[in-house]
Image (cartoon, rainbow, N blue to C red):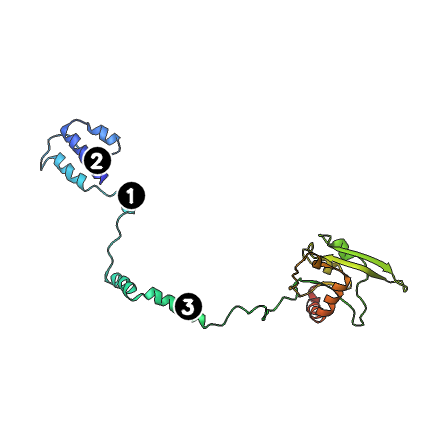
Amino acid sequence: MLRRTTQHAAARLLASGAVPEASVVSRGYSHPYPTGPTGPGSPAGDSKAVARNPSPTPADEVYQRPPPKDLAGVLDDSSQTLFLTEMWRGLALTMKVFFEPKVTINYPFEKGQISPRFRGEHVLRRYPSGEERCIACKLCEAVCPAQAISIEAEEREDGSRRTTRYDIDMTKCIYCGLCQEACPVDAIVEGPNFEFSTESHEELLYDKQKLLENGDRWEPEIAANLRNEALYR
């Protein structure tokens, strides 16, 4: 509307001869209007008709009104409005998913399968005879990047070394598994247990007795996992 009003004003100025044609063109008007007498058959009169219906510009082509819908489009919109088809489709999808098999489990009463490579709570293992596996080589203590392991050892009467103190600060442990990889006798292992949260910091300071108890508890699962992973170690 503003563009048409401007074009009409420019046409009147040109028709009166107050403004030359060149100045109108220099200001960016795409439709120059000739000066001279006006009338139904004059060039100025024809220019007014052109000004009322200017040729479409790129902006007009972009923002032009969409074409009217055909009968099929009108019926489709009307059916969605009257019969709430989109709502019924959503309800049908909800009922379909409602009767599908559940993808969740009722934890803690149900528990999913854990990977044999899972690194959980630490344990110290024994041989089937009951003898401790740890030989106090201290490789796990040396390789631990968090310095969470502390070991003290002494020599036995038969000349072998055994640990007298084996502590792990579980608050420092980053569960990297390097202690398990460094152990030459598979004594220190990160077991499958992940439910060992506590109420105090002191309960996460594991001593040798605590680690041996964990090993006695989880030995069947740990032995099976080590057998399954023996080819990849």
State the residue in front, 199 or 133: 199
Q: Residue at x 41, y 70 (%)?
A: 95
Pick out the residue farthest to the right. 157
Residue at numbered disc 1: 59
Residue 149 is tagged as none
**Closer mark to the observer between disc 3 and disc 2:** 3
Residue 6 is tagged as 2
Q: Residues within 10 Å of mark 1 (few under 14, many from 20)?
A: few
- The amino acid beneath tag 1 is Ala
Spatial distance from mark 3 to mark 2, Cα to Cα? 58 Å
Mark 1 or 3, nearer chain start:
1
- The amino acid beneath tag 3 is Thr
- The amino acid beneath tag 2 is Thr
Q: Residues within 10 Å of mark 2 (few under 14, many from 20)?
A: few
Q: Is residue 208 above or below residue 65?
A: below
Spatial distance from mark 1 to mark 3, Cα to Cα? 45 Å
Asked if labels 3 and 1 touch by Cβ distance under 8 angstroms, the answer is no
Mark 3 or 2, nearer chain start:
2
Kind of element beneath mark 1: helix
Residue at numbered disc 3: 94
Q: Quadrant of the C terminus?
A: bottom right
**Closer mark to the observer between disc 1 and disc 2:** 2
Left or right position of 13 against 91:
left
Left or right position of 67 against 149:
left
Residue 186 appears in the picture as rendered: no
User: Can you give x and y, in whole percent of width and height, for residue 46 in the image?
Assistant: 13, 38
